[in-house]
Amino acid sequence: MDYKDMAKEVLENIGGTENIKYIGHCATRLRINVKNEAEVNKDALADIKGSHGVVFKNGQIQLIIGADVGQAYNQMIEESGYDTESSQNSKEASSSGTTKKDFKYYIDVVGGFFAELFMPIVPALITGGVILAVNNFLINFFGISAESGTAQIILAIFDAAFSMLPIYLGFTTARKLKLSPILGAFLGAILVNPSISGVENLNFLGLPIVPVEYGGSIIPVVLGVGFMYYVDKLMDKIIPEFVKYLLKPFLTMLIVVPFTLIIFGPIGTVASEYVGNFIMWLMNNAGFIALPLLSMLYPYMVMLGIDKATMPIGFQAIESLGYDPVHIVIGFISNLCIGATALAVARYVKEDTEKSGAYFSFGLTGLFGITEPAFYGALIGRPKVLIGTAIGAASAGLFASLFSLKSFVMGGAPGLFTILFFLEPDGGLNNMVIAVITGTIGIVVSYISATLILRHEKKKEGVAAANKVDIENV
């Protein structure tokens, strides 16, 4: 659709351009931070055409758009005249000093922080993850040589997405902390440099450096950029203005790089081992409970914006175990169940052609990994139908836990499109078969459960209507 009218209507109901602090977006949500929440007409925003729902969090308006969020964002920038470059430093997570800092507040802060680190990288992660799975598929089943130019190019694309992850995270973390994003990326590039990453017997001024493989790592660069934040503030205070442009980045990196290599690199390695051990313990001792429960809760984690907080766990699991038994698995199950439930709702409202078509579209995109339009547009207003989603997710999660389903590739938006994530690197099909059965259970059980719930509700409505007519006749 054309989002020009929607952008104009949004501007009218948020207090105009002068009330905008920041405009951004993730995979499905248009995010607008405002200076004064009192000027926002929340009731009007909830009914704006082009949005499938709205979420308000700590001074931020999140309009659920779906896969076309990029178009909506561009139109919003154009209509508002908002300058993304000059306004970058004014970006804040909250616009109200009176926000109650309870447990939910801190959950939102953690979820929002990781979301802003990972969401800009998700397109690269999806591309890298899918293409690695395709590469494994071609090598194991179509006779493509692992030494061929085709395989090497495919692996180069994968490496650019995952091995260079510290560069991307350095950039997004620095931007989040209002530092120079290039310096954050610079730190990431230093870590993945072949002269440093995984190299034995390194030292700096006689101080030994523990060998760490930084490709695909998360914790060292995030901690390094966090440390850079404080070094940057110190340099601002002590360096004279006339030499700041020259000396500040030089001295900052001269301090941050050794600290990151000597301290934060080993911390990341130890944390990775602990995460791997914890995941193994959890899946061995409580997987039959944890996986179904997490699969049921995942839609609400997405709703609260904390699903991205589990993404680092997935990366650390891949790094330490060679596979991820949690993050991609629960996302895969949950997304399929949400999509199937939305398809059930589309069939239920088939008399309303416009709604049925929209819900059918939401259901399909849900099956392929983008669930927010389905969740907000078709399901959240029908809370009883979400019981069907939960039944399907619990059933599929229980099966996945019993047969130890795992993903061998990390990425974003798990669903039918990323089914090859479950293909074993050596071409074994056992895990893939488990994934297909898990997905089938989730889709079928969710669809049937939701349909039965909808029929029951429709029958109750019919009985209530008949009783009302009888009473009126009396």
Image (cartoon, rainbow, N blue to C red):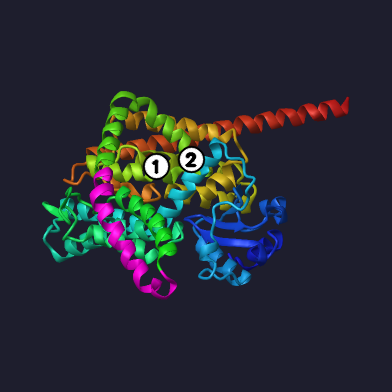
Q: Position of residue 9 (x, y in %)?
A: 68, 63
Quarter of the image for residue 76 reads bottom right
Q: Please give the count of numbered marks on the rendered protein.
A: 2
Pick out the residue farthest to the bottom: 242
Pointers 2 and 1 in contact (C-beta within 8 Å): yes
Magenta-drawn stretch, dominant element (helix, strand or loop) = helix
Q: Is residue 243 above or below residue 149?
A: below
- Residue occupying image coordinates x 51% and y 41%: 106
Which of marks 1 and 2 precedes in the sequence? Answer: 2
Q: Residues within 10 Å of mark 1 (few under 14, many from 20)?
A: some
- Position of 124 with respect to 273 (left or right) is right
Q: What kind of residue is marked 1?
A: Thr
- Position of 91 with respect to 417 (left or right) is right
- Residue occupying image coordinates x 22% and y 42%: 322
Specify whether residue 252 is painted magenta: yes
- Which of the labelled discs sits on residue 199, or is there none? none
Q: Position of residue 108 (x, y in %)?
A: 52, 43
Q: Residues within 10 Å of mark 2 (few under 14, many from 20)?
A: some
- Residue occupying image coordinates x 49% and y 58%: 67
For marks 2 and 1, give the CA distance.
10 Å
Pick out the residue farthest to the right: 474
Q: Which residues are magenta?
A: 240-268
Choose between 388 and 279: the one closer to the eye: 279
Quarter that holds the C terminus: top right
Residue labelled with disc 2: 301
Specify whether residue 384 is painted magenta: no
Choose between 304 and 70: the one closer to the eye: 304
Residue labelled with disc 1: 310
- Residue occupying image coordinates x 70% and y 61%: 15
Q: Is residue 133 something one can see in this rendering?
A: no
- Position of 215 with respect to 113 (left or right) is left
Q: Position of residue 440 (x, y in %)?
A: 38, 38
